[in-house]
Amino acid sequence: MHRRTVIKNLALIIGGAALLPACMQEKGKASIALKNVEISADQEKLIGDMAETIIPKTNTPGAKDLNLHLFVLKMLDDCYKKADQQAFISGMAQFTDAVKKKYDNSFAGLSVKQREEMLLSIEKDKDPKSISISAELKTFYGIVKGQTVNGYTNSRYFMTKRVIYELVPGRYNAHFPYKQKQAV
Amino acid sequence: MSANTYDAIVIGSGISGGWAAKELTQKGLKTIMLERGRDIKHIKDYVNANKDPWEFPHRGGRTQKMIEDYPVLKRDYPLNEVNLDYWASDKDSPYTETKRFDWFRGYHVGGRSLMWGRQSYRWADVDFEANLKDGIAVDWPIRYKDVAPWYSYAEKFAGISGNKDGLAILPDGDFMPPMDMNVVEKDVAKRLKEYYKDLRPMIIGRTANITVPHNDRTNCQYRNKCWLGCPFGAYFSTQSATLPAAMATGNLTVRPWSIVTKILYDKDTKKAKGVEVLDAETNQTYEYFAKVVFLNASTINSAWVLMNSATDVWDGGLGSSSGELGHNLMDHHLGVGASGRMEGYEDKYYFGRRANGFYIPRFANLGNDKRDFIRGFGYQGGASREGWSRDIAELNIGGQFKDALTEPGSWQLGMGGFGETLPYHDNKVTLDKTRKDKWGLPVVAIDAELKENELKMRIAIEKDAREILEAAGAKDVQTHSSNPYLGRGIHEMGTARMGRDPKTSVLNEWNQVWDAKNVFVTDGSCMTSAACQNPSLTYMALTARAADYAVKALKKNEI
């Protein structure tokens, strides 16, 4: 290979490295690369706070520790139809407005109790024609909740530390005794 | 002998092709196995088999890109992130649906033996006699006694685990020890026995997962990741079982990327002399020659190969003189069943992931059980405890909710029917010469539908499922019935049926094409009727039987 070509190639490699997302994260953009939806850093934080309300840190790790909000965004970006992605974005705006209207504050500014109250008000509204909580808002919340839980129960942490998952069980015990840990 | 000349050619490398290759090579025939797709090496190429669930970026789900790329596969469970590479590309290999037909294909060495459901049941005489008794289609040219020794032969080599239940409708086989039912399933089986007095027994599934070490294969490790390819070789596949046995003879050559475009027919000898192959990578055409050809390209593609062959003699292709080639396409219809909640057993669970369930063999139209349709259906199901997706009352979010997710929910009992589809002459595949695939080859057009008998049966499957679950003590029983289309059973059968008369069938009692006696078709296309049992074990038995006959006939210079 000619020396000049080597240098050119090297420059390309170095140039490429400089474009890695972590080094060049645009201010105000989400921390992971998304192809189909535009999510701002503030919105990412909102989803993180919501995920943390659903799966909070207790004496065991919570949503933020496990980056579940990033999993929510990844799934939103890759696995949902355009219409659902659009509903997610408008639902998110409506959610922000609803929080503002109800508490005169941002979601980030609410106490844990208020955050729970806000999310439960959406959970409890089962009326598909509800005026206060629109279909878009429900889609938005549904995706955040569903994928937070999906991400949690399929996380390495959950599957190795909270339940016993073995890649190779090696046996089938059809009479495995079980003691409920808490009343559910 | 030129480089392209062998004793035998096997077209296809799936369940029946692998068996043909094993039998022919073990009997001393130099054999080439032609596979249209890529090679997949045992263990080494099972790229996702040892991944943990969290290593899949979408945790096994499907992306919009996948949905776009696989317009057919997306219709049912096969489209997923974990074994996407094992399913044929709908875009490269399109087909025409005159009526909706969900065709899920595996184009690679091993074919669908890598992804199959592994349930393995013998047929009984009632199945082989059914067409004759009902006066429909044509009679099978064979009976249970003709196949029984070959079932044993196939079971012993493949490794089928199961219980000897002593049921007339579902003959016992040469089984390895059965897998276990869990506590709820055991109780349910007992209740059904009391309630139905042995008329609707529930048994553990008979499955091609080995429960004791067998040849070079390790027994099942209860991973339930079979369809990724098993690093232990614990389920029967071409790669785990027939291919290594065939390779060990030193008589087998495997050629991937080999699309057989036609069987070369010699008008003078009235026999096949070989096949024409299109190399799927280079688009070059080759010819291979042999004394005997086994066609195992899967039901619809085997019909396609025959339709493209000997067209200078018969417009409709090799085997079309009866007018039945491509006709009588069958499948098992499914997607109908029920589920319910079993109260109690909170202190009971199971450990390990059993890739098997229970089976309730056919009971309809047997003895005093008379219906407004003919034939019958079986159920497959299981009892398990619900996971996180259940509704946890009043605990929708927060710390307690998080902890509750680690607890198993209540026991659920569910099952779905597999119904027999009748052979209808007008359920058929034809060539669509107006449309080409990626290689410029004409595609098939599929024109098949469920008819009155199947639709009536589906109503019964739903009704009986509720009745059985309620008899078993299930609460809140819900039934379901969806997508009454053919194909989704992935049990295509019947496009080149066996029969007793060359005027009404494509193959004779030894799976020989009536019009070319050295061409044997032993995949699902040979089936004269469909019964309701999973069919692959029958293909294995028929293939071994036909190969045995073929080699004897060769030695006697009869073919």
Image: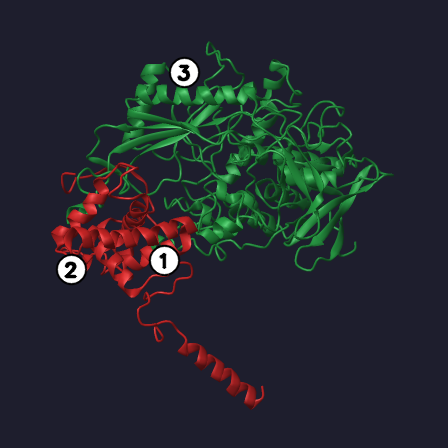
Q: Is B320 placed above or below A52 here?
A: above
Q: Residue at x 60, y 41 (%)?
A: B19
Tell me the amino acid under the disc marked 3: Leu
| Chain for numbered disc 3 | B
Instruction: Look at the image and give the colour of chain A.
Output: red
Q: Residue at x 79, y 37 (%)?
A: B557
Q: Is residue B233 visible?
A: no
Q: Is B556 placed above or below A111 here?
A: above
Tell me the amino acid under the disc marked 1: Lys
Q: Which residue is mark 2?
A: A109
Chain-order first, disc 2 or disc 1: 1
Give the distance between the C-alpha atoms of the residues marked 2 and 3, in whole angstroms. Answer: 66 Å
**Mark 1 near mark 3, Cβ–Cβ under 8 Å?**
no
Camera-side mark, 2 or 1 = 2
Q: Badge 3 local density, few (<14 within 10 Å), some, or many (20+)? A: some
Q: Which residue is mark 3?
A: B199
Camera-side mark, 2 or 3 = 2
Camera-side mark, 1 or 3 = 1
Q: Which residue is mark 1?
A: A74
In the image, taking residue A64 as reference, residue B166 lies left or right, namely right
Q: Residue at x 78, y 33 (%)?
A: B515
In the image, taking residue B454 as reference, residue B475 lies left or right, namely left
Q: Nearer the viewer, residue B8 or A113?
A: A113
- Which chain is assigned green? B
Percent of width and height locating residue B533? 51, 28
Q: Nearer the viewer, residue B399 or B555?
A: B399
